[in-house]
């Protein structure tokens, strides 16, 4: 267990250096300014910021936006994010535009107890993403704070200065509420699940989910394999998949996953029927066929009605559900029924008392597309790559570096 901000003593007047993940989407306005189009990640850090504010700490937030490649670039300034953060918090957030070592400390000098500041994009510094063991930048950052808080689960898989190295030199180093919730929710689902435990793994490629599949086979009762990655399994078993996405070099991996599942008594649940199309844009002809009988010139793009029912029945009989990856090309309205049906089944199971944890950017994007609120699920992870690596069983540098209880 890692220490959290609740384990800190009196922090009134102390400077909290807080790493957050507010890498939010922006759109350009006519006047050249930018607006935040989705403030989900900003809303997610509010409990931590409010707690520190109520305790009288001076709050200095560090965050990244995009990939400015280690140098200042106005395209990636956090100024519009600071503006949105001010709206969300209901108070003016001090945006520190000067760089560390070039005036940032002076801008922070008059920060009051309970006041919030946001530093300019931490990825403006090459040393932030440096893979060496040089701690110079970490020591420079540490001068800005009296203690360190990491609330950026979405960046916890990065061994960067602000996400991992800083925690080694600025003590105490603790988790914020979002980080704590992510670790607890994903950890409980994986390591102490109520059974039956069902994992739904989708997305386009087997190669990106090998570690996930291998780790889950040791833990789950049912493994639903959906989305584009399923066609590699179908072809590995001699099925006809037409022009569907497939990774021939991963067919041996698919067979090995099936073998391990059989040895451990894990039920692999695959599509029976699929929606196929002769035009991926959605403007062609679409029809339902058996998953292993897709003709040449056609490709599978979504779970068929029989498969939707099969998936839903397994999901609704589960007590713990972990979902990572859509089961169809949901971005196109013509191919969205399978993923929507899966989302609705997970929501129904949750309402009936199951624990549901959703991870991965595409999964979150799907439930947002369907207008489904976070309250319909037990936990929606804010970390795309981080939640994936956590499910794989990898050690996340940003978590490992925090103080143990």
Image (cartoon, helix red, strand yellow):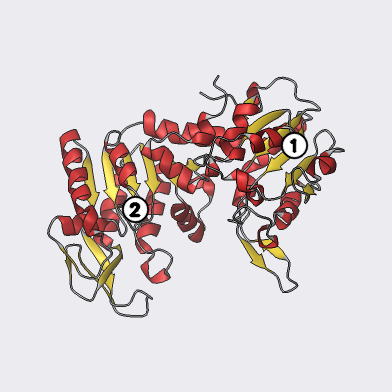
Q: Residue 59 got which mark?
A: 1
160 vs 196, nearest the viewer: 160
**Camera sees residue 175:** no
Quadrant of the image containing the C terminus: top right
Residue 166 relative to residue 263: left or right: right
Give the residue drawn at x 28%, y 48%: 224
The percent position of residue 87, horizontal first and vertical second, equals 75, 52
Which residue is denoted by mark 2 in the rendering? 202
CA–CA distance between discs 1 and 2?
A: 39 Å
353 vs 333, nearest the viewer: 333
Q: Count all numbered tags in the image, as a single digit.
A: 2
Residue 208 relative to residue 5: left or right: left
**Location of residue 267 by image quarter:** top left
26 vs 341, nearest the viewer: 26
Instruction: Specify which label sits upstream in the sequence, 1 or 2.
Output: 1
Q: Residue 16 got which mark?
A: none
299 vs 150, nearest the viewer: 150
- Circle 1 — which element? strand
Give the residue drawn at x 73%, y 28%: 146
Give the residue drawn at x 36%, y 56%: 203
**Location of residue 352 by image quarter:** top left
**Camera sees residue 332:** yes
Q: Disc 1 or disc 2, which is closer to the eye?
A: 1
**380 over 81 or under it: above or below:** above
The percent position of residue 216, horizontal first and vertical second, equals 31, 38
How dense is the environment of label 1, judged by Cα within 10 Å: few (below 14), some, or many (20 and up)?
Answer: many
How dense is the environment of label 2, judged by Cα within 10 Å: few (below 14), some, or many (20 and up)?
Answer: many
């Amino acid at each position: 267990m890692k220490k959290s901000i609740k384990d800190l003593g009196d922090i009134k007047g102390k400077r909290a250096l807080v790493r957050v993940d507010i890498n939010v989407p922006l759109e350009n306005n006519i006047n050249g300014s930018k607006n935040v189009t989705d403030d989900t990640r900003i809303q997610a850090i509010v409990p931590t910021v409010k707690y520190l504010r109520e305790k009288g700490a001076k709050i200095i937030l560090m965050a990244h936006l995009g990939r400015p490649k280690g140098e200042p670039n106005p395209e990636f300034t956090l100024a519009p994010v600071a503006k949105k953060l001010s709206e969300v918090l209901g108070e003016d957030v001090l945006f520190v535009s000067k760089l560390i070592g070039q005036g940032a400390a002076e801008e922070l000098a008059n920060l009051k107890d309970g006041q919030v500041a946001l530093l300019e994009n931490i990825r403006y510094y090459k040393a932030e993403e440096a893979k060496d063991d040089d701690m110079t930048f970490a020591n420079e950052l540490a001068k800005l704070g009296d203690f360190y808080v990491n609330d950026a689960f979405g960046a916890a898989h990065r061994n960067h200065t602000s996400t991992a190295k800083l925690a080694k030199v600025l003590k105490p180093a603790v988790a914020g509420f979002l980080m704590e919730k992510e670790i607890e929710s994903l950890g409980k689902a994986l390591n102490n699940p109520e059974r039956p435990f069902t994992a739904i793994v989708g997305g386009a490629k087997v190669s990106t989910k090998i570690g996930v599949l291998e780790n889950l086979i040791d833990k789950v009762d049912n493994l639903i394999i959906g989305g584009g990655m399923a066609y590699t399994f179908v072809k590995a078993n001699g099925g006809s998949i037409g022009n569907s996405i497939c990774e021939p070099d991963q067919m041996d991996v698919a067979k090995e996953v099936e073998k391990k599942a059989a040895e451990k008594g894990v039920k692999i649940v695959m599509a029976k029927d699929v929606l196929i199309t002769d035009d991926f844009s959605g403007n062609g002809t679409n029809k339902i066929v058996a998953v292993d009988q897709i003709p040449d010139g056609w490709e599978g793009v979504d779970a068929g009605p029989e498969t939707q029912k099969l998936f839903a029945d397994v999901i609704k009989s589960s007590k713990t559900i972990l979902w990572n990856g859509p089961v169809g090309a949901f971005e196109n309205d013509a191919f969205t029924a399978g993923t929507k049906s899966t989302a609705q089944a997970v929501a129904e199971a949750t309402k009936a008392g199951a624990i549901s944890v959703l991870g991965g950017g595409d999964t979150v994007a799907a439930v947002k597309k369907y207008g489904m609120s976070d309250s319909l699920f037990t936990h929606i992870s804010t970390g795309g790559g981080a939640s994936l690596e956590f499910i794989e069983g990898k050690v996340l540098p940003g978590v490992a570096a925090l103080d143990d209880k």
